[in-house]
Amino acid sequence: MIDIDLLDEKYSIEGEVGFIEMEGELPFISVSNKYAQADIGLYGAHVMSFTPHKTMEMLWMSPTSFSEEGKAIRGGIPVCFPWFGPHPSAPEKPQHGFGRLMYWDVVETKSEANGETLIRFQLESSEETKTYWPHDFLAELAITVGTKLQVALKVTNTSGEPFEYSAALHSYFNLSGIENCTIEGLQGTKYFNQLTQDHAVQQEPVLTITDALTRHYLDTETPVVIADPVFRRRIQVEKTGSRVTTVWNPGKEAAAQMADMPDDAYHAFVCVEATNAFNNCVVLAPGESHQTMTVIGLEE
Ligand SMILES: O=P(O)(O)OC[C@H]1O[C@H](O)[C@H](O)[C@@H](O)[C@@H]1O
């Protein structure tokens, strides 16, 4: 049970961080500072909105997303953990792990000296997580709201045995229209095409999306830029501790099949994800940690 009043009492910061609960919606944190406005759901430690002042919303949220326990939120930044995609050996387990299907504990809110706001969450192994995944772990998600949005997922192995996990910070970006936009920074990078199950190398200088696309670019840490000339902006997606960049758009047919997005929503977003999966899963020895981080902002 989430006690929003208690959280508000303990972690709100006057004029900067507030805890909000609305009828029929999952509870969320509202952050407002001199740089930006952001909303962060407690369920899944899920960033749902990030709007630097004097710009438009950077993240896309489905207007028909589910907002109820047991169902993933469509849009924003789902945290996929401790596996990405279908479970490798048990397909009945939830796609993209259980991290996006549980409440995370708020452990700190802080107004930084430079005016940025830090929100820290934790998800610790429990009887419930062990019904999905047998390992002891501590997952920490640190979100910094400034002119840029920084999201860092740190996983520590708190068990006595090594374990392997996969993960992604599955960011949905708000576009003027997919047909107007190009994605820069991936030329010459090899990728696994999930739709055709082939491997290839991107030859084109920029990626243009004209149909359903699910590509996992391998062994790359380079920043990607989403150029949107109609919205007159270039969104830069930087990352560290992630060696796979996933680019996903469902296209027309698959979008129409999804209950939690409008039929034409494929127009409105693209996902560029900081991923650790495929040939870049993370193996942690007892006591070891790994951090996957993404930084999202307008190109300077
Ligand atoms: O519908 P979801 O479970 O949220 O997954 C949405 C998408 O996530 C990733 O980008 C995967 O590579 C896609 O195959 C998947 O369709």
Image (cartoon, rainbow, N blue to C red):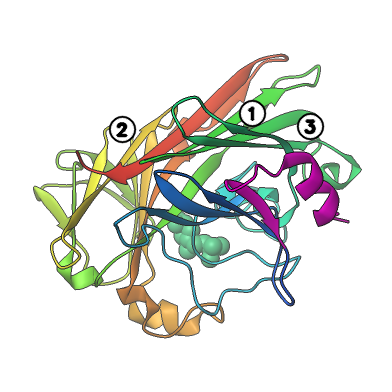
Identify residue type, mark 1: Val
Find numbered disc 1 in the image and state the secondary structure of the residue it sits on.
Answer: strand
Identify residue type, mark 3: His
| Marks 3 and 2, the one that precedes in the sequence | 3
Q: Position of residue 208 (x, y in %)?
A: 17, 61
Q: Circle 3 sits on which residue? A: 135
Q: CA distance from mark 1 to mark 3?
A: 12 Å
Find numbered disc 3 in the image and state the secondary structure of the residue it sits on.
Answer: loop
Residue 54 among magenta residues? no
- Numbered range of the magenta stretch: 1-20
What is the quadrant of residue 66 in the picture? Answer: bottom right
What is the quadrant of residue 95 in the picture? Answer: bottom right
Q: Which one is nearer the viewer's eye here, 249 or 228?
A: 228
Q: Which one is nearer the viewer's eye here, 268 or 8?
A: 8
Q: Circle 2 sits on which residue? A: 220
Q: Circle 1 sits on which residue? A: 155
Q: Is residue 253 left or right of residue 154?
A: left
| Marks 1 and 2, the one that precedes in the sequence | 1
Q: Residue at the spot x=47%, y=35% of the render?
A: 116
